[in-house]
């Protein structure tokens, strides 16, 4: 089965799937993130992050 990129709306404590898919792309590293392991994102920027390390790196860049 081919994996498909999902479109997501990031909310404060959850996310809403806008277009069905299996993964999203980390805004910092470009790594694929399976939706079942997605734990880090920025609501204001509407960006997902692979791990706390990428999330922290993004905060430092700002």
Image (cartoon, rainbow, N blue to C red):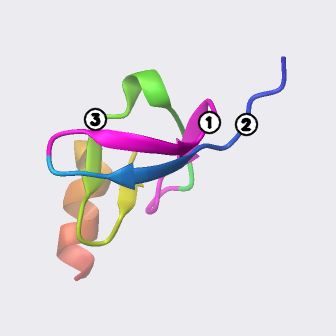
Q: Nearer the viewer, residue 41 or 62?
A: 41
Residue 51 appearing in the image = no
Tag 1–tag 2 contact (CB < 8 Å): yes
For marks 3 and 1, give the CA distance.
Answer: 18 Å
For label 3, the residue is 39
- Label placed on residue 4: 2
Disc number placed over residue 20 in the picture, else none: 1
Stretch in magenta:
13-29
Q: Residue furthest top?
A: 1
Q: Secondary structure at mark 3?
A: loop
Q: CA distance from mark 2 to mark 3?
A: 19 Å
Secondary element at image label 2: loop
Element marked by disc 1:
loop
Residue at (19%, 58%) from the top-left corner?
Answer: 56
Q: Which mark's residue is nearer the viewer, 2 or 3?
A: 2
For residue 15: magenta? yes
Left/right of residue 34 with respect to residue 28 in the rendered view? right
């Amino acid at each position: 089965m081919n994996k498909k990129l999902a479109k997501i709306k990031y909310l404060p404590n959850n996310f809403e799937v806008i277009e069905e898919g299996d993964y999203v792309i980390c805004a910092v590293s470009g790594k694929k993130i399976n939706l079942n392991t997605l734990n880090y994102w920025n609501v204001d920027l509407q960006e997902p992050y692979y791990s706390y390390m990428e999330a922290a790196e993004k905060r430092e860049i700002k």
